[in-house]
Amino acid sequence: MPEMLFKVPGSWSASAHVDDTKYREMYAKSVRDPEGFWGEHGKRIDWIRPYTRVKRTSFAPGNVSIEWFGDGTTNVSLNCIDRHLAKRADQRRSDRETQGQPVGGPQVHGAHYHGLRIMTAAFGLTA
């Protein structure tokens, strides 16, 4: 399969947190020292019970397992939505595209952090 390259719009690359040089540096560190790299990046999110073990892996025949931050406890909704509410409640957070509408084709739906919080809470009550 031929490799496909997509040009990144200038406005995207200008506001990116990581450029190509930084990405390559980070990737090299993640390969050279995965526990150190991911241990550092694991601290970027909030933990209910912080991890003490970054990874535990086994590639033994018949016993392949990969566990990341296995002794820690976190909450994905808290990290993705709730911790942003104080400063960004009205900031648009996501877009999703839905397919298959009978009229008009794909539609884009957006949500603000506050709206995502309400939808997530409602889903939790019905799940």
Image (spheres, grey):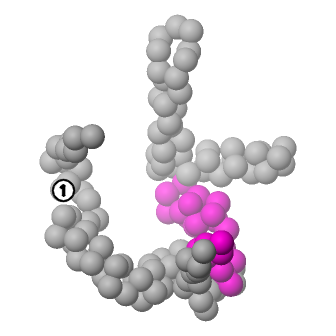
Name the amino acid type tagged 1.
Ala
Q: Position of residue 23 (x, y in %)?
A: 25, 69
Q: Is residue 58 left or right of residue 2?
A: right
Location of residue 101 (image quadrant): top right
For residue 89, above or below residue 62: above
For residue 66, above or below residue 111: below
Give the labeled residue for mark 1.
14
Q: Nearer the viewer, residue 89 or 41?
A: 41
Q: Nearer the viewer, residue 33 or 41?
A: 33
Q: Nearer the viewer, residue 1 or 22?
A: 1
Which quadrant is the N terminus positioned in? top left
Q: Confirm whether the magenta stretch covers residue 78.
A: yes
User: Tag 1's secondary structure?
Assistant: helix
Which span is picked out in magenta? Answer: 62-89
Residue sitting at x 65%, y 72%: 62
Q: Residue furthest top?
A: 103
Q: Confirm whether the magenta stretch covers residue 19.
A: no
Callout 1 environment at 10 Å: few (<14), some (14 to 19), or many (20+)? few
Q: Residue furthest bottom?
A: 52
Q: Is residue 83 left or right of residue 14?
A: right
Location of residue 75 (image quadrant): bottom right
Residue sitting at x 22%, y 44%: 3
Q: Nearer the viewer, residue 63 or 27?
A: 63
Residue sitting at x 53%, y 46%: 112
